[in-house]
Amino acid sequence: MTVEIAFVGAGGIAQWQHFDNLESIDHAEIVGICDVDAETAESAAERFDVPAFSDHHALYAETDPDAVFVCLPPFAHDDQEIAAAEHGYDLFVEKPLALSAEKAREIRDAVEDNDVLAQAGYDWRYSAGVDRAREILADRAVGYVDGYWWGGVAGGEDHWWRHAEKSGGQVVEQATHIYDTVRYLAGDVERVSAAGSHRLENAVDFSDATSATMTHENGAVSHVSTTCAAEDGKHGLEVVADGATIEVTEQAVSGVVDGEEIDESFDRNPYAAEVESFVDAVATGDGAGLRSPYGDALETFELTLAVNESIERGEPVEL
């Protein structure tokens, strides 16, 4: 079966990853492109020799795809996913899912009501490093996880990423990958207490450094720190478990496991892996192998919103 795919949002990660990765899959075919920026839509459409649209309703009506990739900034989510679900189209939705929990829950309900497959773009779940960490931790009790996403400010001058009202801030838009991986390795969170500061980076209107401590339902504890004021990038997690203390990135795992030192590195494109998994699920109609279904991604999204809420309120938040 050839899986016909339409895109809503043709800039950013669509161009950086998804177009190339889909081109490498023999049974995937892009049939239409929609973007509110006409030049972006037309450029991408020309690449695949398909029609370009500025309105997603017209895209759906004229292309009738099997699945839709929604690659939008947080503030731009309206009814794109809901309309696709109502048409019966499976969905690949880039993170973060929206700006508000209410909108994301509305989308989740549409996905469930229309019985479509929906995957969120948490590529760390498809990385070889996280795969290996899951193997090591499979039969071990996790006691503590320390995650970090340190880097710089994204986008050019006055880019939407730099404004909390459009991006949700660094925790919601960017460090969400680390929060999601914390959940993936240590289980669901029941309580978060966070603090933030804004002392170093004037290009953003949100906290340029945050620290969040979490209690998990299974009794584990975790911590995630973020900053967009770092001179160098650093993204990963350190895990203390029964008989294992490891550091995990997308492409490496190192540390001590059962008294033996390990230092393993990998070469896998997790974006390609997540896209291939989604296309295969659409082709077979079986979503059991999807590692980041929309409903689970919603829990990560709500966790990042709770971090911001805790910073604003100055007190812990229960999930």
Image (spheres, rainbow, N blue to C red):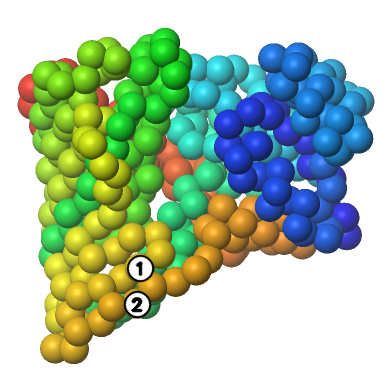
Closer to the camera in the image, 296 or 213: 213
How many discs appear?
A: 2
Disc assigned to residue 262: none
Residue 171: where, in percent of width, then height?
30, 32
- Where is residue 287, by image quadrant? bottom right
- Label 1: how many Cα within 10 Å (few below 14, some 14–19, many 20+): some
Cβ atoms at labels 2 and 1 below 8 Å apart: yes
| Comes first in the chain, label 2 or label 1 | 1
Lateral position of residue 318 relative to residue 292, left or right: left
Residue 99 appears in the picture as rendered: no
Quadrant of the snapshot with the C terminus = top left
Regarding mark 2 in the picture, which secondary structure is present there?
Answer: strand
Residue 315: where, in percent of width, then height?
8, 26
Tell me the residue that label 1 is attached to.
252
Marks 2 and 1, how far apart in space? 6 Å
- Label 2: how many Cα within 10 Å (few below 14, some 14–19, many 20+): few
Residue 155 higher or lower than 187, as above or below: above
Residue 65 higher or lower than 133, as above or below: above
- Where is residue 6, by image quadrant? top right
Lateral position of residue 113 relative to residue 222, left or right: right
Identify which residue is drawn at 44% across, 71% down. 266
Lateral position of residue 298 relative to residue 23, left or right: left
Give amino acid for label 1. Ala
Give amino acid for label 2. Glu
Identify which residue is drawn at 33% across, 60% down. 249
> Residue pushed farthest left?
315
Residue 175 higher or lower than 173, as above or below: below
Quadrant of the snapshot with the N terminus = bottom right
Regarding mark 1 in the picture, which secondary structure is present there?
Answer: strand
Residue 170 appears in the picture as rendered: yes
Disc assigned to residue 264: 2
Identify which residue is drawn at 90% across, 32% down. 50
